[in-house]
Image: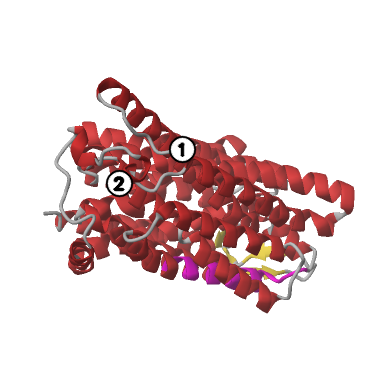
Amino acid sequence: MRPVGGLSGEALARACKMRRIRQVSAMLFVYAIFYICRLAFSASKKDMIEQGAYTAKEIGVVGSAMLIAYAIGKFVNGFVADRVNVRRYIMFGLFVSAMANFIVGFHVPALMLAVVWFVNGLAQSTGAPCCVVALSRWWPKERRGTYYGIWSCSNNLGEVLAYILTAGVMVWAGATYGADYAWRSCFWGASAMGAIGIAAAWLFFGNAPEDEGLPPVRDEGRGKREEGRDEGEDVASGQKIALMTPAVWLIAIAGGLFAASRYAVIDWGIFFLQVKKGYSGTDAAMIVTVNSIVGAVSSGLSGIVSDRLFKGSRQELAVSAGLMNVTALVLFMLVPGRHPWLDVTAMVLFGLAVGILLTFLGGLMAVDRVPKCAAGAALGIAGIGSYLGAGLQSAFSGCLVERGADGAAKLMGHTFSGGYTLDWLALFWIGVAALSVVFTLIAGRGRK
């Protein structure tokens, strides 16, 4: 990207505005591509099981390996991102993720699949820390919530693109080349999208305003710049503060429990609707996609609402969203029978909740508690809780799916005398969502 030089006054202000618009747009798009390279696995689970490519337990373990790798990587990369050129680092991470998808499309053995998808988890973990550190470099603290919320829409945008694109590609590839190539096409398509994301990062993603000849945040008259972003020893002490703040770890636990319920729907929601309620793969994907569309709007508004109406406090909205999450899962999981409008309503509520909680528990509440120079470290701590919870959920949920006598996959549960069957998945997903609300309340009490 060409540096801006020799500008002053209104011309410089316009240049800063345009570069920031480009930056947030690049962050939205590039991180959405990360999600496509992550969710191809989720969209193709049922086909892989039914084609006999992998068992439900193998898929659960592979999904768990990826998310545990993501948790570890996000923690490490949060600390690394505070110190590196985030533009180059995010391009590297997306390249590795795209290559992992390309390899999986060749139907590798289960053990190799677990290894490759573990590497994909490490690569995926570079995306969010790079974006959050870029946020701290391009925008002052008093506007951080607003732009963090806008960037958080990328999660939902990525989910929408992943579900729509993969569903379309699978239908086309299955009809053209046969069912075995339907699920493989998901991974090859995701790899191609990864290449597009790398190009977008190279062209539009910026490391810091100073690298492009623009003044740092402190010189734009938009709030006092915190000390220490440019000095290694101050970054180190800021990261130490992040490690020693109890509220940051409580937020990480709450985020882990929330992530378990969120990824339960992302990973197994389509499968649940197909197996439990008899929807087709396309209809199930469209219903689950509703939550991503609503969540994008919710994410975008969450930071703005908390900045302007609650003066930067996230607690009130986080607790309300947690209760909404529990309600949505109850409607989705416990109401028997096929009721499209009720299932869509559940996904609307779920999307509203996820948009807020993903923004707040996913990092913003933790970032708010630490110095600006340790934004990546705070996100890393929040991330290790979130994705350890998501990873354990994947393995546990996989164990609660079994193959019936007729060879079809089904959910394990208990059937009562009246004929109603309670799935153990329902108790697990709803239970972790409720515990997340409890820990969010505890973390709020520790607010300084």
Residue 100 x %, y %: 64, 64
Rendering quarter of residue 171: top right
Q: Are marks 2 and 1 in contact (CB under 8 Å)?
A: no
Residue at the far bottom in the pictured view? 111
Observer-nearest of 387 and 2: 2
Is 274 magenta? The answer is no
Residue at the far front in the pictured view? 6
Q: Is residue 179 above or below residue 213?
A: below
Residue 149 x %, y %: 36, 40
Note whether residue 335 is visible.
Answer: yes
Q: Which mark is residue 103?
A: none
Residue at the far left in the pictured view? 448
Figure colour scheme: secondary structure
SS for callout 2: helix
Rendering quarter of residue 146: top left
Query: Magenta part of the protein: which range?
Result: 53-71
Residue at the far top in the pictured view? 10
Q: Amino acid at mark 2?
A: Arg
> Circle 2 sits on which residue?
137
Prevailing secondary structure of the magenta residues: helix
> Circle 1 sits on which residue?
296
Q: What's the residue at 57%, 65% (across, down)?
A: 120
Is 69 magenta? The answer is yes
Observer-nearest of 63 and 376: 376
> How many numbered circles are shown?
2
Q: What's the residue at 46%, 36% (across, down)?
A: 25
Q: Is residue 298 left or right of residue 370?
A: right
**Disc 2 from disc 1: Cα separation:** 24 Å
Note whether residue 361 is visible.
Answer: no
Residue 252 x %, y %: 31, 62
